[in-house]
Image: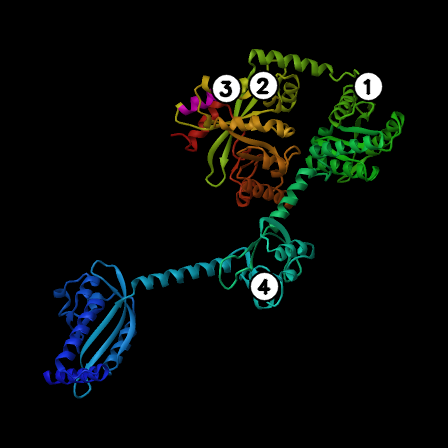
């Protein structure tokens, strides 16, 4: 062995002498020793015998492996094996060095504490006279940092690949001429185009012609489009997709310097939903006529046009006398068909420029802009009334209607649209009070109250003073967990002589007479008392209290709410205020009051959404926490695709605005399942529970585990 070592040493010295020009053997050995020391200090060195048993390790090896020299010498490299590499990996390595060839590669090892490290490895075999390896020297360099960086780059590249291939956004790089330099895979996945084909085109071949100018201007001026704009993009099959787009100039040095990043997001579904919502806001879903809110806006515009042209406009309010009897006798479906037929008749009888709307359940309104004077408008109204009263045949049954009309003239009776509506309503009320089935032009001083109304108003005043009211509570249920989320307080009037009087009969009267103010204060106080009582019993539940526009308009209403809660020792998170739709008619005036209520810590809900007052702009502008979908959209959701689409659009809009959604009027399991599938979070209705007295509601809470 010594002879073999001497031979190797002789060979090394011979090579070094040739390379350095030095012949002194002592100098060459000294130089060779310096090289060995330098290598030992900078590299991880291990020497093994031909079987792989370690015979020597340097200090660098012990540091990185965290094993001592005593632990390493005598063992094999299995001591630091990380099980990262396959058996074939090491089999090939041994096959190479076994042939006397140098092996190079990167290996992941495991240190004593279990951590991993990477080394760039070169294994040099030393051969005997027969050419067989008798020793191996492994020289390694720590490349852990580089491998970690490579792994991070690989992960980042994988994440980028996943993002670009699955993103719903469209990212491209274009030059100043609009030619594509890069396109994300979404152009292929979502638009159907071949990436290679698009690279031969420009952005102008993808975008609708109406958007060319704004893009061309930005590219030519090298100006960014930071604020998103809407552009139309044409997919492979010719469909237009609405995109929200931004354009940013690349100022960083590199391949795409002074190019543009065009980022587009597909908002086609959102625009479709908004369009559906706008139809919902503007039109009555049963008759497709303008709803109350839109009718008022269009009437105002009509009067403004009449003022400019110095012409007259007639306003006719129409009521179907005793429509309830049609519903009772033939069913609600027949009642709905009757309303649709009357709407069709109005569209047929009136000119296209007239404004027609469905104002409430059994009331319509329309303008007459061709009338020259009062006699002419009365004549036209009479003719329309006769046409509306012609028999209607539904399911082979003839229905004969009675129609009442109230008429007011612009500018004779009123100069403002709201005043004109009031005058027409008063004229209609006069007809109704005198038996209905007629028409009447507004007259100054016209009586609007009949005996029944006067009596009811007097009884309302006495009952408010005497406290002849009580509250019942209807649960709101979390649809996914089928657990109680909150309850709604509903006022009930049980008159000692007249019996139970429906809320839709006395609440409007209370608002008109402002008796709603003391009544509303009593309702809030009673709800607070009940909330505190339930909390003490271990049933903390939020109670929603309805509040009207009349109450919100009252000076000091916020202070009054705060005072009542403090006097009743109730936390604000146990009370929610539900605003009836009439509260949104003057949203600008109401916004400050609603915001102040929310700052108390009280949540605010928008009630009866979709019935005419609530509009898209209200939802975006008013500070609110919850949106309650009106029961009219839930009633036939399992049968009517249109109702389902509307509800879905409302839920999408609410999610966008960050609002919770509650569906009213759930009457079946199927309706509840559909609503949950559409993304609705909460619901209430007779399927879960009718409004309950406090004790019964408490029993229900205990039964379903809502109490601690």
Q: Nearer the viewer, mark 4 or mark 3?
A: 4
Pick whichever of labels 4 and 3 is earlier in the sequence.
4
- Which residue is at 75% across, 18% downward? 448
Separation of residues labelled 4 and 1 (CA atoms): 72 Å
Q: Which residue has dot 1 on it?
A: 443
Q: In which quarter of the image is residue 585?
A: top right
Q: How would you rate the neighbour count of disc 2 (Cα within 10 Å): few for under 14, some for 14-19, many for 20 or more?
A: few
Label 4 crowd (10 A; few <14 / some 14-19 / many >=20): many
Q: Quadrant of the C terminus?
A: top left
Quadrant where the image shows the N terminus: bottom left
Residue ID for mark 2:
555
Magenta portion: prevailing SS class? helix
Q: Of all residues shown, which one is farthest toward the left?
A: 2
Disc assigned to residue 526: 3
Q: Residue at x 42, y 59 (%)?
A: 156
Looking at the rendered structure, the secondary structure element under dot 1 is loop
Residue 608 seen by the camera: yes
């Amino acid at each position: 062995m010594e002879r073999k070592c001497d031979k190797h040493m002789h060979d090394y010295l011979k090579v070094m002498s040739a390379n350095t020009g030095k012949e002194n053997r002592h100098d060459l050995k000294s130089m060779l020793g310096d090289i060995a020391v330098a290598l030992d200090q900078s590299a991880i060195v291990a020497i093994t015998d031909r079987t792989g048993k370690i015979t020597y390790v340097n200090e660098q090896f012990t540091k990185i492996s965290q094993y001592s020299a005593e632990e390493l010498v005598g063992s094999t490299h299995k001591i630091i094996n990380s099980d990262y590499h396959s058996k074939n990996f090491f089999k090939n390595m041994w096959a190479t060095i076994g042939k006397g060839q140098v092996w190079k590669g990167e290996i992941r090892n495991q240190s004593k504490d279990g951590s991993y490290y990477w080394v760039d490895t070169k294994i040099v075999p030393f051969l005997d006279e027969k050419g067989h390896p008798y020793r191996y020297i492994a020289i390694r360099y720590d490349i852990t940092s580089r491998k970690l960086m490579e792994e991070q780059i690989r992960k980042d590249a994988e994440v980028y690949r996943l993002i670009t291939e699955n993103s719903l956004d469209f990212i491209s790089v274009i030059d100043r001429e609009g030619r594509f330099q890069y396109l994300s895979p979404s152009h292929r996945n979502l638009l159907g185009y071949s990436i290679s084909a698009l690279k031969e085109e420009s952005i102008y071949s993808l975008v609708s012609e109406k958007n060319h100018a704004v893009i061309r201007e930005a590219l030519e001026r090298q100006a960014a489009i930071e604020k998103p704009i809407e552009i139309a993009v044409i997919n492979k099959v010719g469909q237009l997709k609405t995109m929200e787009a931004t354009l940013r100039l690349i100022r960083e040095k590199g391949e795409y310097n002074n190019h543009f990043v065009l980022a587009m997001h597909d908002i086609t579904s959102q625009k479709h939903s908004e369009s559906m919502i706008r139809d919902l806001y503007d039109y009555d879903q049963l008759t497709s006529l303008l709803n109350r809110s839109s009718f008022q806006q269009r009437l105002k515009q009509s009067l403004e046009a009449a003022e400019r042209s110095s012409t007259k406009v007639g306003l006719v309010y129409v009521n179907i006398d005793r429509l309830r009897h049609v519903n009772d006798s033939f069913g609600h479906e027949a009642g709905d068909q009757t309303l649709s037929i009357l709407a069709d008749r109005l569209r047929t009888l009136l000119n296209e420029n007239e404004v027609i709307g469905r104002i409430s359940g059994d009331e319509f309104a329309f303008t007459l802009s061709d009338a020259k004077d009062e006699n002419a408008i009365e004549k036209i109204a009479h003719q329309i009334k006769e046409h509306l009263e012609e028999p209607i045949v539904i399911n082979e049954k003839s229905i004969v209607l009675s129609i009442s009309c109230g008429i007011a003239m612009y500018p004779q009776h009123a100069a403002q649209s709201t005043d004109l509506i009031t005058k027409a309503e008063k004229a209609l009320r006069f007809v109704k009070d005198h038996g209905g089935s007629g028409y009447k032009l507004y007259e100054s001083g016209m009586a609007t109250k009949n005996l029944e109304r006067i009596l009811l108003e007097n009884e309302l005043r006495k009952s408010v003073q005497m406290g002849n009211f009580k509250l019942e509570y209807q649960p709101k249920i979390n649809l996914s967990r089928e657990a109680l989320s909150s309850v709604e307080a509903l006022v009930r009037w049980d008159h000692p002589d007249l019996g139970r009087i429906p809320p839709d009969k006395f609440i409007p009267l209370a608002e008109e007479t402002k008796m709603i103010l003391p009544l509303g204060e009593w309702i809030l106080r009673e709800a607070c008392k009940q909330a505190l009582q339930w909390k003490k019993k271990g049933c903390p539940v939020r109670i929603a209290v309805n509040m009207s526009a009349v109450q919100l308009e009252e000076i000091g209403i916020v202070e009054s709410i705060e005072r009542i809660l403090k006097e009743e020792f109730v936390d604000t998170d146990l009370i929610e205020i539900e605003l009836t739709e009439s509260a949104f008619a003057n949203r600008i005036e109401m916004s400050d009051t609603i915001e102040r209520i929310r700052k108390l810590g009280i949540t605010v809900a928008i009630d009866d959404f979709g019935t005419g007052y609530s509009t898209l702009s209200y939802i975006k502008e008013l500070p609110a926490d919850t949106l309650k979908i009106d029961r009219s959209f839930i009633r036939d959701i399992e049968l009517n695709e249109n109702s389902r689409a509307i509800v879905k659009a409302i839920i999408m809009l609410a999610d966008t605005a960050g609002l919770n959604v509650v569906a009213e009027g759930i009457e079946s399991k199927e309706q509840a399942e559909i609503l949950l599938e559409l993304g609705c979070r909460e619901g209430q209705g007779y399927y879960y529970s009718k409004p309950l007295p406090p004790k019964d509601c408490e029993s229900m809470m205990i039964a379903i585990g809502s109490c601690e």
